Amino acid sequence: MKFNTKAVSSVLAAATLLSLLCSCEPEIPFSTDSVTQVTAPEITAPEITAPETLPGIDTGDVTTERETDTVTEDETTAPPQTTVTETDPETEPAKDPDAPEFKVDLSAYEKYMDPEDRDGYIILVNPSNPVGKDYKPTDLEPLVDTRPDRSKRYLRLYAAKSLEAFLKEARANGCKDVTVTSAYRSYDSQKEIFDGDVKRLMEKGYSEEEAIAIERKDTAYPGESEHQTGLAVDMHNLGAASQKFADTFEAKWLAENCWKFGFILRYMPDKEDITTYVYEPWHFRYVGRYHAKRIYDMHMCLEEYIEYLANN
Ligand SMILES: [Zn+2]
């Protein structure tokens, strides 16, 4: 089995980087005062259907060769195979035989979906691995697919571009009306969501302690949300995020194809004990295609995968 040992040290490096970043001042202005709250999902939806196809483990030569970062717009729109280049063939990038096929021409997005910094996005944020109050990515980009009734949403550059490709291809494959309802959330906006939901639970008669315990299964505690990394996105075609989305064609397509664009379905129905969060068919997390494919093929959640990397 081939394995990139660099990945393990890079995970550690990513953890170190995170702790460094936590003490950094935010570098770009970003308003969070108009964040719209995502309604908490229903907790009691039964009979969740997992993605139907879970292919066997394939740890073969996955993306050891990649496109260069220097493809230009002109090159990507040129008719294929019509000119003979005089470039030394040894310097020509070999096309990755395992690269997925798309209906839409996504070649301009390839460098984002399959980043050269392969291990740069393996960042784990969960209740055991919180980020600091001041952690804020410095490369946030506005998303083109934010739901029209929401304020502008942001993701880190590579995740934003890959999501753009993801949604283009999703539409070409019949996914209707899937739009982004939430992406980057600051510590303060996460706190606003969390505290608001706790308040509503307390109004229903729960003690504060009970309300916080219930809320933590649905919504990340401030500082523990991977939305704060700018690498996580919520998208669906319902009025509010709900596990009912899992029954739609769109949710199944997104779950089965997300790895091609560098995303993973972060909170799966059979991993709730590990992630500590309920199944969220609308929540996708960018990690880059190399790791996304492995995570998908091995049907692991990110917590399991990072442990796997550390042990292999
Ligand atoms: Zn989410």
Image (cartoon, grey):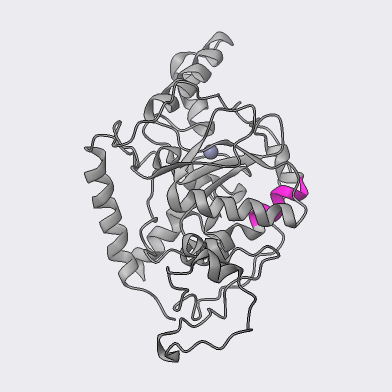
Residue 253, x across and y down, in percent: 70, 55
Q: Is residue 250 magenta?
A: yes
Q: In the picture, which quadrant includes the N terminus?
A: bottom left
Instruction: Please give the name of the residue rendered at 74% of the width and 50% of the height, measured from the top-left corner.
Output: 175
Q: Residue at x 69, y 64 (%)?
A: 53
Q: Relative to 1, is 31 above or below?
A: above
Could you tell whether 160 is left or right of 221 in the image? right
**Displayed quadrant of residue 247:** top right
Task: Check residue 311 for magenta coloring.
Answer: no
Q: Main secondary structure of the magenta part?
A: helix
Say which residue appears at 73% left-offset and 41% top-offset. 177
Q: Is residue 50 visible?
A: no
Instruction: Give percent across and percent down for residue 147.
Output: 63, 34
Q: Residue at x 43, y 25 (%)?
A: 32
Q: Is 235 placed above or below 50 here? A: above
Q: Camera-side residue: 304 or 58? A: 58
* 137, 242: nearer the viewer: 137
Q: Which residues are magenta?
A: 248-255
Give residue 38's position: percent from left, percent from top.
58, 28
Pick the residue in front: 264 or 43: 264
**Quadrant for the C terminus in the image:** bottom left
